[in-house]
Image (cartoon, coloured by chain):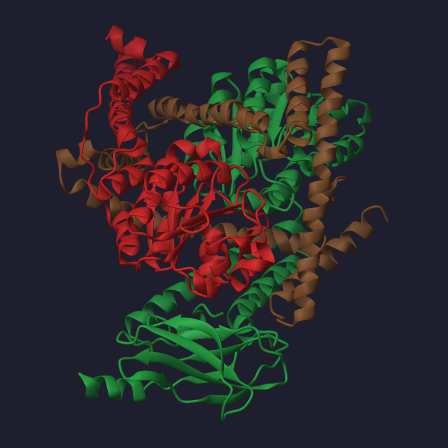
Amino acid sequence: MKILDKLAVLDRRIIYLFVGLAVIIPMLIPLGLPVDITRPVKNVYDKIESLPEGSIVLMSTDYDPGSEAELYPATEAVIEHCFRRNLRIYMMGLWPAGSALGERALDTLGRIHNKTYGIDYINVGYRPGGAVMLLSLGRNFRDVIRVDYTGRPIDSLELGHQVHSARDITMVMTLSAGDPGVIHWVQYFHARFGTPICAATTAIMAPRQYPYMNSGQLVGLLGGLKGAAEYETLVNRRGRGLTGMDSQSIVHVLLVLFIILGNVILIYQKRKKSAVGAA
Amino acid sequence: MFWIGFLIINALNIQAFDTPNDDGSSITITWPADTILKAMGITRSLNSSGDFEKIADATSRDSIFQDATVQRGIDYYYRLKWNDPEGERFSNVAGPVRAQVQFLNFFRLQNIGLLIAILFAVIIFYINHARTGKKLTIRRIPGLTAVEDAIGRATEMGKPVLYVPGIMDIDDPQTIAAMSILARVAEKTAEYGTTLFVPTCHAMAMTMAQQVVKEAAIKVGRPDWYNIDNIRYLTDDQFGYVSAVDGIMIRDHPATNFYLGSFYAESLILAETGHSTGAIQIAGTAMSDQLPFFVAACDYTLLGEELYAASAYLSQEPVQLGSLKGQDLGKILFITLILFGVITRLLGWNFFYNLFSVQQ
Amino acid sequence: MKRTIPQIIVFACGFFMLTAFFIPVRFVQDMSQMLQNWYIGVAAFFVFIGIINLIKINLEKIQRKVRDWQYSYILLGFLFFMMFAGFVLRGHTEGPVFKYMFAYFYTPCSATMFSLLAFFVASASFRAFRAKTPEATLLLIAAVIVMIGRIPVGYGIWHGFPSLVEWIMTVPNTAANRGIIFGINLGLISMALRVLLGIERSYMGGGD
């Protein structure tokens, strides 16, 4: 069949065009597809729901702008949930660029929920040092953190003054795109101090975290944009996660169609070859 | 309810002991977790009869606390206190307890230390065995067998070879493995007179790569072939680096691309761009997340441990091959331990599992 | 001598770091920490070496007017301007110019490069997911199930899809991952021992 012969040498730019359209069209015409909730995401939600009011949640923005599309919606959804539950957020980051992204989410949502910087939330910014820093941090926050993101002395802020060690932190929420990230929090902070860890990771990294969830070292996991969309559904927030899921759904279906097409072409070529061979 | 509460309160028996396997800087206090009690204070004194000072807060979900503010050689006493409708309550006094230095972490020695010692012994045995001259058989690794052919292809086409040693710095073992393989690749490209590009993501990796390539050129008697500008630092930024490498691929059209080392999300971007230029691609990484992308987009892929074995494989030196044999025997040992662990747990015997439990 | 001294340093430092894992004594831990801090300090200093290399190569390109030399002007221009904005302009890294360039130059460019993955996944899937062998067929089926099961459409087709996906992720995927990780770490230990004992020296240059 001539059309299959042509499709066998399909220019990759045609594929890119289809993918581009599959992403853009649902953004312009939202489909509003419902999102099912999976257990790892529900675990995170239930954990935050179980925290008493006033508990301090340490949020670590361990990603950079390259992973913003997947992890920023999760950042916003979790902050929203924490603020609604009147939990206090102590934000930091193991990656330099993550702090700026986290700051933006905190500022925006802090204004919406009438939260006060220094009392309800605080951002101490990027802390280098990876695993070694985490061990020092858990023992004594003052060894690692003296000032906040803007340079103000940490003890001059009410929330900063109250946190001295890992024992003052009720839960860690790490939003992680690589190393250092969730594995460091689990292997060093949780293993040493016992603090429960929840994580949001890029979709590629999510499978690697399942062993930690199975062993109980990780409470729950938001994997990729889907995880963020599930969380937004749970907290009843229409954010970029849910918006992006329409596009992701269409792109996944398109990928499956391309895979089926590729295999149809393979079968056709095999038959053609054996027909030529027989002849 | 009052009697139950009374019984529970009086049953709160705390224990204090020197934290095992540490440097004598902490004392551990334990007590049974109690869901009825809400908030507690941990208090400490230098004598059993009074002057207990609060050192930390605890909640009803906790059952362990490590006091890391103690001084060695001093006896301490501990007591918990909490409030209930009847007033302030106290647990028993635990102590005297003194923090002491342990010079060896016996917990780690009995599991990790023992396993590493056995593994080292096995590897060293096979290295010495190889020194006796006995030939060792290593299975064929297609990706490594194809290295020379791939470089030959680039030479015939008159195009350069591109070698990407990962995006991590030289503190990453994968980068060290990549540099070891780079030495072999550089020898071959220098011998054939083929241009070799090595763009790096970190300045230290650049320095190491320059040294490796230069020495390789000298070794095969082609010092004139070496061009320091072909081994360059691009940027530390992940996506800045990958866009620069893509630019090299699109402009210079290398015929052979090597991606060996530590990669993250940029792996597929590199591999697909390289494929679009028609290059033959050999990849290898120990990042299990990125292996599927390399397998899908590259002609040959070294999976995980094959990257670490590559240098030994390419050298074909008996001593290095001996270490690979030892590593394989180590793998058999681990499989046996896993099976033993699974069986003992299924039978309800926890002694083996407890040997490897996480401890502070 | 040129390689002997580095080998001695490698062995001494490697052996020390290995034994420090089993010795909790404060002095030993402090020494171990100091070695790691030295590395961080050296690595930070090397950033300058990298920048100097970058400037040197691009200046040579401009001087020799090689192909695409004009882009070197753009690269060096942005490099120096960003450094100026960060070090000199008001507020250092919090200054409005630096923040603006971070938010509207660097962030979109990074996100754009990351977005290329969406297109490349499509072209790689079309090319690579073909049922040529039984293993490839298994991979293909698992990939299709996971891709469909992870989206609302999958849940709409069959309510059991997400559970099946979760089973694939938590059982066969986790088992395979653990096996690969075991192999990787064993290979790492073997390579580390070769480096420690000086059997593997090619990373230092000069071969064996």
Which residue occupies 30% across, 12% down?
A: A7
Which residue occupies the extreme right position in the image? C1
Task: Tell me the quarter of the picture where residue C130 sits.
Answer: top left
Q: Quadrant of the C terminus of chain C?
A: top right
Q: Colour of chain B?
A: green
Which residue occupies the extreme top position in the image? A2
Q: Nearer the viewer, residue B319 or B98?
A: B98
Measured from the top left, where is residue B94 in percent x and y? 46, 88
Left or right, B5 with respect to B139, comes to: left
Q: Nearer the viewer, residue A100 or C190?
A: A100
Task: Tell me the quarter of the picture where residue A204 sits.
Answer: top left
Measured from the top left, where is residue C181 in percent x and y? 46, 51
| Chain that is red in the image | A
Which residue occupies 38% across, 15% down?
A: A12
Measured from the top left, where is residue A125 in percent x and y? 53, 44
Q: Nearer the viewer, residue A36 or C140?
A: A36
Measured from the top left, where is residue B165 in percent x and y? 61, 34
| Chain that is brown in the image | C
Residue B113 visible in image: yes
